[in-house]
Image: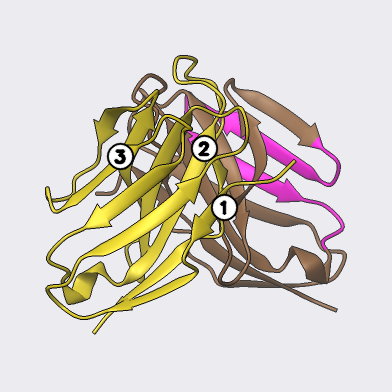
Chain colours: A yellow, B brown
């Protein structure tokens, strides 16, 4: 069974640009989560999508946004990039949106560098 | 104060040693507890998952939860060089679904 996949592996942008990161969940998983892993800050929750809807959002500004497509894949958009947005962005998926016991499985991440 | 505190390490042990990794948390609303392993430049890999106080064993790994003390541990028996990685504790309140992570403990097992 294929795991969570993310693209691109690496992304280099300059300050003020927009970045788009993509995630494909494990087959049969309907929930997708985005996390940011910045140096010195650890893993922080960004967004949760389930069945095409945004279900929860972490403490990040509105320039972090995303969406989930009918095939359950997801896109994270970061507008007006700032230097401190440089981080590893991780996507995770879980099988259902309702049961709170479902565990999350992570992809390899997209490393975003903002110059 | 962070909601989840994790022993920062780094931790270096000889091959075959028993490793103890620990986290404490402040919010009693956390119900589900996980341990992830993350190799350098990779995504976290789920190792253990538990939702009740007590011990859960899986091969060389034992997860321990003490909800009364708000304390969780991961024990690794007969540690191997391939166990060298960063170990992250994580927990969730349940319905809110997002995971709250500890800062991670970097473990090196020396051959």
Q: Based on the picture, tell me whether residue B65 belongs to the magenta stretch.
A: yes
Q: Nearer the viewer, residue B45 or A107?
A: A107
- Residue B54, given in percent of the width and then of the height, sits at 66, 24
The Cα atoms of the two marked residues, 2 and 3, are separated by 14 Å
Residue farthest along the bottom direction in this orientation: A115
Above or below: residue A33 compared with residue B103: above
Residue farthest along the front direction in this orientation: A70
Label 1 element class: strand
Identify the subunit bearing mark 3. A
**Which residue carries the number 2 mark?**
A93
Above or below: residue A101 compared with residue A31: above
- Residue B76, given in percent of the width and then of the height, sits at 76, 52
Mark nearest the camera among 2 and 3 is: 3
**Which residue carries the number 3 mark?**
A67
- Residue B104, given in percent of the width and then of the height, sits at 49, 59
Q: Residue drawn 71% across and 69% down?
A: B84
Label 3 element class: strand
Label 2 element class: strand
Identify the subunit bearing mark 1. A
N-terminal of the pair, mark 2 or mark 3, is 3
Looking at the rendered structure, which numbered label has been put on residue A50? none
């Amino acid at each position: 069974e294929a795991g969570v996949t993310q693209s691109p592996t690496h992304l280099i942008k300059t300050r003020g640009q927009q970045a788009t990161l993509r995630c494909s969940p494990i087959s049969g998983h309907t929930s997708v989560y985005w996390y940011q892993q910045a140096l010195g800050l650890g893993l922080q929750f960004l967004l949760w999508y389930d069945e095409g809807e945004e279900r929860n959002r972490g403490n990040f500004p509105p320039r972090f946004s995303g969406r989930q497509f009918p095939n359950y894949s997801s896109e994270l958009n970061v507008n007006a990039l700032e230097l401190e947005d440089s981080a590893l962005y991780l996507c995770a998926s879980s099988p259902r949106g309702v049961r709170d016991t479902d565990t999350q499985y992570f992809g390899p991440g997209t490393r975003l560098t903002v110059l | 104060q962070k909601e989840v505190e994790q022993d920062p390490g780094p931790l270096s042990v000889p091959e075959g040693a028993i490793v103890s990794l620990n986290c404490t948390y402040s919010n009693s609303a956390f119900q589900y507890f996980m341990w992830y392993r993350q190799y350098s430049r990779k995504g976290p890999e789920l190792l253990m998952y538990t939702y009740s106080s007590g011990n859960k064993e899986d091969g060389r790994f034992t997860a321990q939860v003490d909800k009364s003390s708000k304390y969780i541990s991961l024990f690794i028996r007969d540690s191997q060089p391939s166990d060298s990685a960063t170990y992250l504790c994580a927990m969730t309140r349940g319905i809110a679904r997002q995971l709250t992570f500890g800062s991670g403990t970097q473990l090196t097992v020396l051959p």
